[in-house]
Image (tube, rainbow, N blue to C red):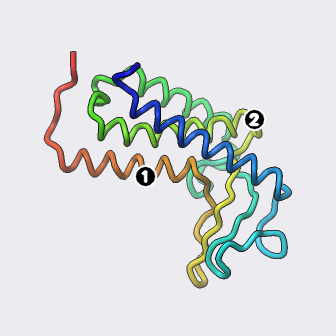
């Protein structure tokens, strides 16, 4: 377990931050709060806190497939564990990437089990463009994947530890 401390630590941090922020949103905003007057403006015309549910994946792809996506998330976490050596999880940079990714996957998986949808609450506006609403787990997933891609493109192939 100590060999995977970065992965486990970051997973725990992302998971706790994600669930804590979602519980805060659930306690402060009724479900379905989107736009004014119910949204909480953090930075006017740019950043709002809302409370919506997503039964799909990123950008609401596969909407209504929450159970299938929950099963896929569980299988993904299991696959990462099973193939941890092949994924080179002994490397700190890879553990950081997968720690963010796994924490995000676990956070959204808990939502799917607990609420039958993922709780999204970060609403960003760029002029007339409104970015799809997201959460801390989504941030962990996106940053984790980006870091892993960056690492993979910059690092020659590494053999897995026996």
Q: Secondary structure at mark 2?
A: helix
Residue for point 29% across, 23% down: 85
Quadrant location, the N terminus: top left
Q: Residues within 10 Å of mark 1 (few under 14, many from 20)?
A: some
Can you identify the residue that label 2 sits on? 114
Q: Is residue 60 left or right of residue 26?
A: left
Residue 156, picture quadrant: top left
Residue 102, percent from left and from top: 48, 36
- Of all residues, the one furthest to the left in this rendering is 156
Q: Residue furthest top?
A: 162
Judging by the rendered image, the residue that carries numbered circle 1 is 143
In terms of secondary structure, where does tag 1 sit?
Answer: helix
- Report the disc number at residue 78: none
- Left or right? Give the position of 106 relative to 145: right
Mark 1 vs mark 2, CA separation in Å: 25 Å
Nearer-the-camera pick, 152 or 16? 16
The picture quadrant where one finds residue 131 is: bottom right
- The residue that appears at 35% across and 35% down in the rendered structure is 95
Count of numbered tags: 2
The quadrant of the picture occupied by the C terminus is top left
User: Which residue is at 16% across, 36% downward?
Assistant: 157
In the image, residue 109 above or below residue 21? above
Residue 6 in percent (x, y) is at 39, 34
Q: Earlier in the sequence, mark 1 or mark 2?
A: 2
Task: Tell me if mark 2 has few (under 14), some (14-19) or many (20+) residues whose alpha carbon lies within 10 angstroms of its own.
Answer: few
Give coordinates of residue 88: x percent, y percent.
Answer: 27, 30
Q: Quadrant location of residue 109? A: top right
Answer left or right for 29 relative to 73.
Answer: right
Looking at the image, is 75 positioned above or below residue 157? above
| Rendered location of residue 91, percent (x, y) | 26, 33
Q: Residue at x 59, y 48 (%)?
A: 57
């Amino acid at each position: 377990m100590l060999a995977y401390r970065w992965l486990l630590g970051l997973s725990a941090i992302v998971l706790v931050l994600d669930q804590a922020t979602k519980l805060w949103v659930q306690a402060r905003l009724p479900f379905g709060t989107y736009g004014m007057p119910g949204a909480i403006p953090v930075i006017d015309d740019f950043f709002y806190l809302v409370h919506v549910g997503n039964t799909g994946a990123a950008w609401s792809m596969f909407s209504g497939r929450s159970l299938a996506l929950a099963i896929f998330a569980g299988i993904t976490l299991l696959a990462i564990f099973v193939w941890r050596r092949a994924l080179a999880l002994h490397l700190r940079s890879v553990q950081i990437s997968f720690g963010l990714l796994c924490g995000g996957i676990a956070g959204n998986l808990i939502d799917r089990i607990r609420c039958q949808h993922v709780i999204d609450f970060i609403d960003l506006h760029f002029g007339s463009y409104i970015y799809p609403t997201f959460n801390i787990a989504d941030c962990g997933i996106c940053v984790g994947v980006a870091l892993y891609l960056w690492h993979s493109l910059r690092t020659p192939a590494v053999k897995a530890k026996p």
